[in-house]
Image: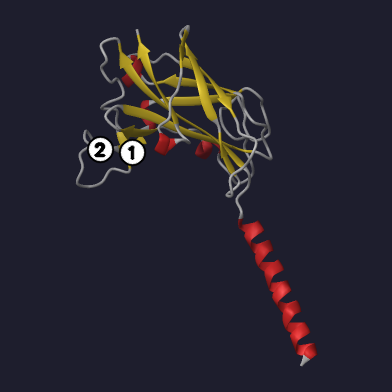
Amino acid sequence: MKTFIIYALLAMVALNLISCDLRFDALPPKTVFYNLGFNFQDSSGNDLVNGIGLEEWIPANISMENALSGTVNRELYVLDIAVSDPCTNWDNDIYNSPARPGFIPDVNRPIFTLHNNGDCYLNSSFSLLADACPDQRILIYKLKIAHVFGDDAIYEFVTYWDVPKEYLRDNSKFAKCYRIEFDGNVFIPETSENESRYYSATIVLK
């Protein structure tokens, strides 16, 4: 009887160790997210993002004009992001992850989604694997959006980030954008209490 109890206890310990290993292996790789949204307005306060074309996430009973969110039509803009500290997982020459056998680089290019909470925001969720890239303190967003700017020129936004030291339970951490520089002006991003992982700023174009 005593031998049976010992074997049972050993089996329980082994199962616990296996389950711990499974939980550990199930964790995603360590990832840093840089989430930022842009609302653009003219000097009269008109929302310049409103009405931009969408291509996905549109419920069948909601018109394009009244949709609250969606993926912006990728033919209507160019979004390039350059990192300040180049790394093996991001190539500033192609604004993309480096090509790997079996993968097409374009599938990793940053995209814009639209969020409408009264004002329309072009949201970008940019992420980098921590094992392949150091924490980025500066990201340069290069935007070409005729719908917003009225031309096909490229406009650069220099953004500054604080990256927390600790990861969350799912191996993620969310950087805080605290400053945006554009056209000689400084903009301070904000975040609401219920969206503390997403920063946004209203950019007034003169």
Q: Residue 145 occupies which quadrant of the picture?
A: top left
Q: Residue 9 occupies which quadrant of the picture?
A: bottom right
Q: Residue 202 occupies which quadrant of the picture?
A: top left
On screen, residue 143 above or below 2: above
Residue sitting at the far front: 2
On screen, residue 172 above or below 91: below
Q: Tell me how far mark 1 sits from mark 2, CA to CA.
A: 7 Å
- Mark 2 — residue? 67
Q: Residue at x 65, y 63 (%)?
A: 22
- Of 9 and 25, nearer the camera is 9
The crowding category of the residue bearing disc 1, from other C-alpha atoms within 10 Å (few below 14, some 14 to 19, many at least 20), is: many
Q: Is mark 1 on a helix, strand or loop?
A: strand
Q: How many labels does the image show?
A: 2
- Of 175 and 115, nearer the camera is 175
Split into 4 quadrants, where in the image is the C terminus?
top left
The spot of residue 39 in percent (x, y) is 36, 23
On screen, residue 153 above or below 191: above
The spot of residue 57 in percent (x, y) is 32, 43
Look at label 2 and name its amino acid.
Ala
Q: Is mark 2 on a helix, strand or loop?
A: loop
Side (left or right) of 167 relative to 203: right
- Mark 1 — residue? 70
Q: Which residue is drawn at 66% across and 25% down?
A: 85
The spot of residue 97 in percent (x, y) is 59, 35
Look at label 1 and name its amino acid.
Gly
The spot of residue 160 in percent (x, y) is 55, 21
Q: Residue 11 carries which label?
A: none
The crowding category of the residue bearing disc 2, from other C-alpha atoms within 10 Å (few below 14, some 14 to 19, many at least 20), is: some
Side (left or right) of 33 relative to 199: right
Side (left or right) of 182 relative to 43: right
- In contact (CB < 8 Å): disc 1 and disc 2: yes
Split into 4 quadrants, where in the image is the N terminus?
bottom right
